[in-house]
Image (cartoon, rainbow, N blue to C red):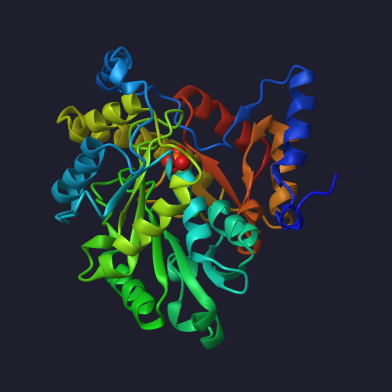
Amino acid sequence: MRRAGRIAKVPPYLFAEIDRKRREAVARGVDVISLGIGDPDLPTPEFIVERLTREARDPSTHRYPPYQGTADFRRAVALYYSQRFGVSLDPETEVIALIGSKEGLAHLTWAFVDPGDAALVTDPGYPVYGIHTLLAGGQVIPLPLSPDNDFLPDLDAVPEEARERATVMFLCYPNNPTAGTADLEFFARAVEFARRHDILLVHDSAYVEVTFDGYEAPSVLQVEGAREVAVEFGSLSKPFNMTGWRLGYAVGSRQAIEALGIVKTNTDSGQFEAIQRAGVEALTNPLSREFISGMRAVYQRRRDLALGTLLKLGCPVRLPRGSFYIWAPVPTGHTSAGFATHVLERAGVIVTPGSAYGDRGEGYFRVSLTLPDERLEEAFQRLAACVNW
Ligand SMILES: *Cc1c(COP(=O)(O)O)cnc(C)c1O
């Protein structure tokens, strides 16, 4: 059997070692607490589940759905954009439904990266952007993120040659994994950069609703003219605890949406129509804004709990305004992977090594706040007993 060369380009799975140690610990009877995976612990709101169960009984949902998503779902996304961001979208040409935004981000790369092209990808970053660039035969050019620049890339520092070869640039705010946030002024600079260099700006807004202290994260499409050069990916996973449902969307540039549609039409056949109808409920029911404020309060309480402990231990961590992650430097003398192993062996707690998100993630670890308060509290008590900065 000869596997395609592109498979060998996928970097080794950094969690493999941790996973092996986790299984060993569990086998020894250790009550392992995982702060590793960003997957909400709370259930999907009842009114959304209710709508799905009702629609699943309607046989008209049992057939292949329209490729670009149902007209109702696309209209619901457009309505959400106009109410939440004051951005008007044409549901016919500027919105497409996705089987989760991860699916769309992966397929978009195939529509925009040829062998020899490059993608500007933040480092650290969500691995999908870079890995699909490599699979498509492109080159990844990292845009370093550091706390000195509030986890925003320095676009002026992108070399001339990189600007020429890049066909896409991936950004994500509120950011996974650094929890950095971006304001409209930064987005305006990114849009200008994309326009000047004929690069498609891809903004991943998975955490746009997961924000704290009254902060409301913007959409890149609020920037004048952004829809000509930018496409924004959204997901129902994080705001509505719907990670298992697989429903998201892309909005913005018609050319980008059309190109993504060409890849998708030839790959998948869309999400179950009953799920799309439940997605309409999530995006348009007035109960949703109430649900989202409750969700924000839950994560804000957990953030404060986690941050309180880390600060007491002397960890120089920043107060995040968005995402449900805490991104913090490991104590001196540790590597990211070494620290993750240390806390698993000493405390039975799993954290994600920052190096899993790129070279610039080395020296950091990520904690996800997606587990019940008592478990989070217990995890941080155990950490406090075996680490300090
Ligand atoms: C969770 C996550 C997504 C994927 O969400 P799905 O819609 O569930 O595929 C996309 N981007 C980032 C940065 C994420 O953390």
Towards the viewer: 3 or 66: 66
Could you tell me which residue is drawn at 58 percent across and 61 percent down? Answer: 133
Q: Is residue 86 left or right of residue 199?
A: left
Could you tell me which residue is drawn at 38 percent across and 22 percent down? Answer: 43
Q: Is residue 377 left or right of residue 83?
A: right
Can residue 182 be seen at all in this image of the molecule? no
| Residue 385 point in image, percent of width and height | 65, 34
Towards the viewer: 3 or 22: 3
| Residue 180 point in image, percent of width and height | 42, 57
Furthest-bottom residue in view? 160
| Residue 269 point in image, percent of width and height | 44, 37
Total residue callouts: 0
Q: Is residue 359 left or right of residue 298?
A: right
Could you tell me which residue is drawn at 46 percent across and 28 percent down? Answer: 244
| Residue 124 point in image, percent of width and height | 56, 60
* For residue 213, above or below residue 220: above
Could you tell me which residue is drawn at 25 percent across and 54 percent down? Answer: 93
* For residue 51, above or below residue 173: above
Furthest-right residue in view? 1
Towards the viewer: 59 or 130: 59
